Amino acid sequence: MQWWDAILRHIPVVGPLYTSVKQVSDTLLSSSGNAFRKALLIEYPRKGSYTIGFLTGIPGGDVLNHLDGDHVSVYVPTTPNPTSGFFLMMPKSEVVELDMTVDAALKYIVSMGVVAPAPSALIPVAPAQRPTEPPM
């Protein structure tokens, strides 16, 4: 395993992408934690633009006293290094849960959209749970 890891790290273009995905996966997706719970589609940074974010939980503490309605905590990673990004608290009604694994979404972000998730990376969802219209 270490031999394969060393080879991947030294391949031009692939090495930096592999290193970033591995670092995030090892840190945030370990079996001891559940930092990124679901991949989300959010309208960000402006109306009409969309990006992928990750559900990290719900706002807590004094923040709850200042928010109206149900909100979720969302981490929006930057490309190509997902270890930096933005933390947002968004109305729950403004996020769309994606039928995609967190790992597949991370690969999509790190590759700057070049490596689209394979159909096998999709999470099976009953037809009644799917959105009726894509967000526009």
Image (cartoon, rainbow, N blue to C red):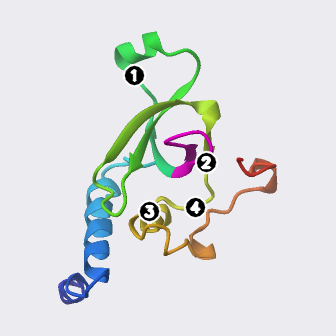
Q: Give the amino acid at mark 1.
A: Gly
Question: Residue at 26% across / 56% down in the picture?
Answer: 27
Label 3 crowd bin: few (<14), some (14–19), many (20+), radius 10 Å: many
Q: Is residue 31 visible?
A: yes
Inter-mark Cα distance, 2 to 1:
21 Å
Q: Is residue 78 above or below residue 22?
A: above
**In the rendered image, which residue does mark 2 sit on?**
97
Q: Is residue 14 above or below residue 38?
A: below
Residue 123 versus residue 11: which sits nearer the camera?
Answer: 11
Q: Earlier in the sequence, mark 3 or mark 1?
A: 1
Q: Give the amino acid at mark 2.
A: Glu
Inter-mark Cα distance, 4 to 2:
9 Å
Which element type, helix, strand or loop, lies under badge 2?
strand
Inter-mark Cα distance, 2 to 3:
16 Å
Measured from the top left, where is residue 21 in percent x and y? 33, 67
Which element type, helix, strand or loop, lies under badge 4?
loop
Which element type, helix, strand or loop, lies under badge 1?
loop
Q: Quadrant of the N terminus?
A: bottom left
Question: Residue at 31% across / 82% down in the picture?
Answer: 14
The picture quadrant where one finds residue 120 is bottom right
Inter-mark Cα distance, 4 to 3:
13 Å
Q: Give the amino acid at mark 3.
A: Ile
**In the rendered image, which residue does mark 4 sit on?**
100
**In the rendered image, which residue does mark 3 sit on?**
109
Inter-mark Cα distance, 4 to 1:
27 Å
